């Protein structure tokens, strides 16, 4: 299999530098590559891995022990001094998004356990990645239980397995490299912080550069051997440079002045914890070694900060990644460029007034005949937990009860897939052994009655927000309260790994503002820009929500939907508006869609229309002030008193 040459990759200078620095100093902690689709993220990572120095390991050791410093707790050890050694290329181990837990950490060797009755450990992907690179494509789609395993291994440098009668611990130190498309959702903060460096990549806009990329790719596809040979000298030069930088690394001096400058930068950017300081220091040392210096300078610190700090400044998934370059230059004593004396041109589409709401126009830029307003939400808060009824069977998550692959074992079953229930298998075989033919003979033998675990845990859902944006919601205080509640629900959906969608209705129609996606920050952006005004087409909103859920069920039949309708219950658009709204609610109830109605009606005198809508939907009715988890506790205590 031919690997695209690393030196032939165009337009990813920051990515190439970050990967090279991690190759020089693996203790940096790896690289997270964020970027739009089709930007050669995976190609670059695989190409760089081919340049890594070879690994010397104890012959026959399945855990890649270093002969010079073998792991004293190696399951294949202890290894005596002077043990036979072998050399091999560094491994790039790919962790699939759909991998099972036992494949990642290793498990009991089932064949030997059933045939010979011996409990032998079979290593997993973490053991194979030791002293190499662990690559996770679409890392933001990784299941939570696998994220937890990576967090433990990355923090401790070891993998521990305690299950199925196996108790094993082995070294698992690797460079973690992940790629992701932010449009498909963000990473959990804990895993995000484990990546030493982060890089944003985008397709170049220069036509000449784009043409060169296509030219090289076509040449590689036409004749990989010729193309690789053409870049062989450049690849060899990069390999030598990596080796020289690794040799120089221990001699690079990090002076007290440089260390204080790193601390000042990290404190000024208000990052959490001390990992940012450590990673920035290690990256600055690696950069000095990479460029051939024996002492860290402020230029090295600037490069390190730009790679190590942006992803550590995000407090929640709605914060924009990045950092203030001018502040970094000021802290490191670099002079920013002089401003344009003529000032910016404010007459263009991005000048003053751009993006402001225009009275009499809706969110599609069409006249609506009624004034609109845009209210900003306040800071989000912790919400109540809203769940779907009954027990589902969707993807592992953190919201509703479901039969999943992770959780607590509640029973056993027959089947060909899923984790094996070893005690149940032994019991079933002992009481009712099956007879199977021996291949190539007329004889038979006793076979195993394999049983699988029935596991109950939590699943992720589709949380579809159906939001009333009509004139009755346009009062700034009310819309601010509603938007804050919705933003809080989006933050809760992010933490529970849900898919989210957003339907709004105002004027005379409903709009699918955001099709179901894992990117809650996109939903938050659309929400902030949402105007309010006009009549209330409640029926159209409910019907659009029903159609969205129907289409999503065709794509993901196992992912249950939770519809959250945010409205005061009024229906004022079109003839028979109230009757049509109730008929749409009956349709949703007949489809078995779990729903919650968040009642936005406020004030002393209330009509109670949202409560009536919730009754027809078979949904839970929640006043907007009780979406807050702490507010619910206060209400319950008050009612009890």
Image (spheres, helix red, strand yellow):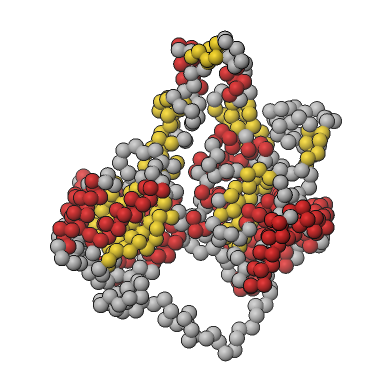
- Relative vertical location of residue 440 with respect to residue 595 in this rendering, above or below: above
Q: Is residue 338 visible?
A: yes
Closer to us: 77 or 294: 77
> Can you name the residue that lies furthest to the right here?
82
- Relative vertical location of residue 530 with respect to residue 358 in this rendering, above or below: above
Q: Residue at x 75, y 65 (%)?
A: 297
Image quadrant where residue 266 sits: bottom right
> Can you name the residue that lies furthest to the bottom here?
342
Q: Is residue 635 visible?
A: no
Closer to us: 589 or 122: 589
- Relative vertical location of residue 55 with respect to residue 509 in this rendering, above or below: above
Tag count in the figure? 0
Q: Residue at x 56, y 49 (%)?
A: 139
Q: Is residue 490 left or right of residue 305?
A: left
The location of residue 159, given as percent across then percent down, is 62, 36
Q: Residue at x 39, y 60 (%)?
A: 514
Q: Is residue 236 left or right of residue 551?
A: right
The location of residue 558, given as percent across then percent down, is 39, 42
The location of residue 145, given as percent across then percent down, is 51, 40
Q: Residue at x 53, y 42 (%)?
A: 98
Closer to us: 376 or 549: 549
- Relative vertical location of residue 226 with respect to residue 88 in this rendering, above or below: below
The location of residue 97, given as percent across then percent down, is 54, 44
Q: Is residue 450 left or right of residue 12?
A: left
């Amino acid at each position: 299999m031919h690997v695209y040459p690393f030196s032939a990759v165009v337009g990813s200078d920051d990515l190439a530098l970050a990967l090279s620095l991690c190759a020089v100093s693996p203790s940096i902690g790896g690289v997270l590559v964020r970027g739009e689709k089709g930007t050669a993220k995976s190609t670059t990572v695989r190409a760089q891995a081919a340049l890594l120095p070879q690994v010397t390991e104890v012959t026959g050791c399945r855990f890649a022990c270093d002969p010079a410093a073998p792991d004293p707790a190696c399951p294949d050890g202890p290894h005596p001094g002077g043990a036979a050694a072998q050399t091999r290329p560094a491994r790039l181990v790919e962790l699939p998004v759909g991998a099972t837990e036992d494949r990642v950490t290793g498990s009991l060797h089932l064949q030997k356990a059933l045939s010979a009755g011996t409990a032998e450990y079979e290593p997993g992907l973490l053991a194979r990645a030791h002293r190499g690179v662990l690559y996770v494509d679409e890392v933001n789609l990784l299941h939570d239980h696998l994220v937890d395993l990576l967090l433990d291994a990355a923090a401790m440098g070891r993998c521990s397995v305690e299950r199925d009668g196996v108790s094993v611990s082995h070294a698992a130190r690797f460079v973690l490299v992940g790629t992701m498309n932010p449009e498909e959702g963000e990473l959990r903060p804990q895993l995000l912080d484990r990546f030493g460096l982060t890089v944003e990549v985008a397709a170049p806009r220069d036509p000449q550069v784009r043409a060169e990329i296509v030219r090289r790719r076509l040449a590689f596809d036409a004749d990989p051997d010729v193309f690789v040979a053409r870049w062989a000298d450049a690849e060899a030069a990069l390999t030598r440079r990596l080796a020289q930088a690794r040799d120089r690394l221990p001699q690079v001096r990090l002076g007290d002045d440089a260390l204080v400058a790193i601390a000042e930068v990290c404190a000024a950017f208000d990052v959490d914890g001390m990992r940012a300081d450590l990673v920035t220091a290690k990256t600055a040392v690696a950069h000095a070694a990479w460029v051939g210096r024996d002492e860290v300078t402020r230029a090295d610190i600037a490069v390190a900060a730009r790679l190590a700090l942006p992803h550590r400044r995000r407090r929640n998934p709605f914060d924009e990644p990045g950092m203030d370059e001018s502040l970094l230059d000021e802290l490191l004593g670099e002079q920013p460029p002089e401003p344009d004396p003529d000032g910016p041109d404010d007459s263009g589409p991005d000048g003053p007034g751009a993006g402001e709401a225009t009275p009499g126009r809706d969110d599609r830029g069409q006249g609506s005949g009624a004034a609109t307003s845009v209210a900003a939400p306040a800071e989000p808060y912790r919400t109540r937990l809203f769940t779907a009824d009954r027990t589902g069977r969707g993807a592992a998550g953190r919201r509703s009860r479901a039969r999943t692959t992770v959780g607590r074992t509640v029973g056993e079953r027959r089947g060909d897939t899923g984790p094996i229930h070893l005690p149940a298998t032994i019991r079933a075989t002992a009481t009712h052994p099956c007879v199977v033919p021996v291949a190539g003979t007329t004889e038979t033998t006793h076979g195993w009655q394999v049983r699988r675990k029935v596991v109950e845990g939590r699943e992720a859902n589709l949380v579809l927000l159906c939001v009333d944006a009509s004139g009755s919601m346009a009062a700034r205080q009310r819309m601010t309260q509603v938007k804050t509640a919705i933003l809080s629900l989006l933050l809760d959906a992010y933490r529970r790994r849900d898919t989210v969608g957003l339907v709004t209705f105002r004027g005379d129609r409903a709009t699918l503002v955001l099709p179901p996606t894992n990117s809650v920050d996109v939903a938050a952006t659309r929400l902030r820009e949402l105007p309010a005004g006009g009549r209330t087409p409640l029926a159209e909103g409910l019907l659009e929500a029903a159609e969205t859920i129907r289409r999503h069920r065709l794509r993901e039949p196992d992912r249950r939907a939770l519809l959250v309708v945010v409205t005061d219950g009024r229906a004022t658009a079109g003839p028979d508006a109230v009757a049509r709204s109730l008929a749409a609610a009956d349709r949703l109830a007949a489809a078995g869609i779990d729903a919650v109605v968040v009642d936005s009606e406020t004030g002393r005198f209330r009509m109670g229309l949202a409560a009536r809508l919730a009754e027809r939907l078979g949904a839970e009715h929640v006043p907007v002030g009780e979406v807050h988890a702490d507010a619910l506790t206060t209400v319950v205590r008050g009612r009890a008193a």
